[in-house]
Amino acid sequence: MSTPFTDVAAEHALFNTKSRQKIQQTEFMMSAPTFRLCPPDMA
């Protein structure tokens, strides 16, 4: 019998695998101490 923690860990691993397959390219733009100082969304 599995614990709920095992199920959560397995789901998290599957989500991460699927998410990484969709990412084609990333670029670090900047860091900001608050959301207000972040650049506008370009999407």
Image: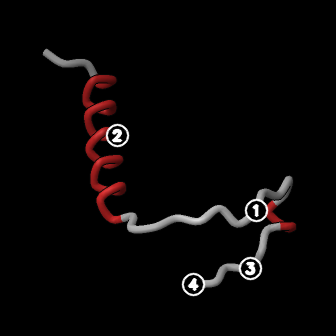
Mark 3–mark 2 CB contact (< 8 Å): no
Cα distance between the residues tagged 1 and 3:
12 Å
Q: Amino acid at mark 3?
A: Pro
Quarter holding residue 11: top left
Q: Residue 40: which disc?
A: 3
Give the residue drawn at x 82%, y 58%: 32
Q: State which quarter of the image contains the N terminus.
A: top left
Name which residue type carries label 2: His
- The local secondary structure at tag 2 comes to helix
What residue is shown at x 26% (from left), y 44% (from top)? 14
Badge 3 or badge 2: first in the primary sequence: 2
What residue is drawn where x is 33% and y is 23%?
A: 5
**In the depicted structure, whether residue 28 falls above or below residue 43:** above
- Expressed as whole percent of the image width and height from the top left, the position of residue 13 reads 31, 39
- Provide the residue designation for mark 1: 30
Whole-angstrom CA distance, mark 1 to mark 2, is 28 Å
Q: Which residue is mark 4?
A: 43
Furthest residue in direction top, as rendered: 1
> Where's the C terminus, which quadrant?
bottom right
Corner quadrant of residue 23: bottom left
Instruction: Tell me which amino acid carries mark 1.
Output: Met
Q: In this image, 11 relative to 30: left or right?
A: left
Q: Which residue occupies the extreme left position in the image?
A: 1
Q: Nearer the viewer, mark 1 or mark 2?
A: 1
* Disc 1 from disc 4: Cα separation: 17 Å
Give the structural element (helix, strand or loop) at label 1. loop
- Compared across the picture, whether 5 is left or right of 38 comes to left
Q: Nearer the N terminus, badge 1 or badge 4?
A: 1
Kind of residue indicated by mark 4: Ala
Which one is closest to the eye, mark 4 or mark 2?
4
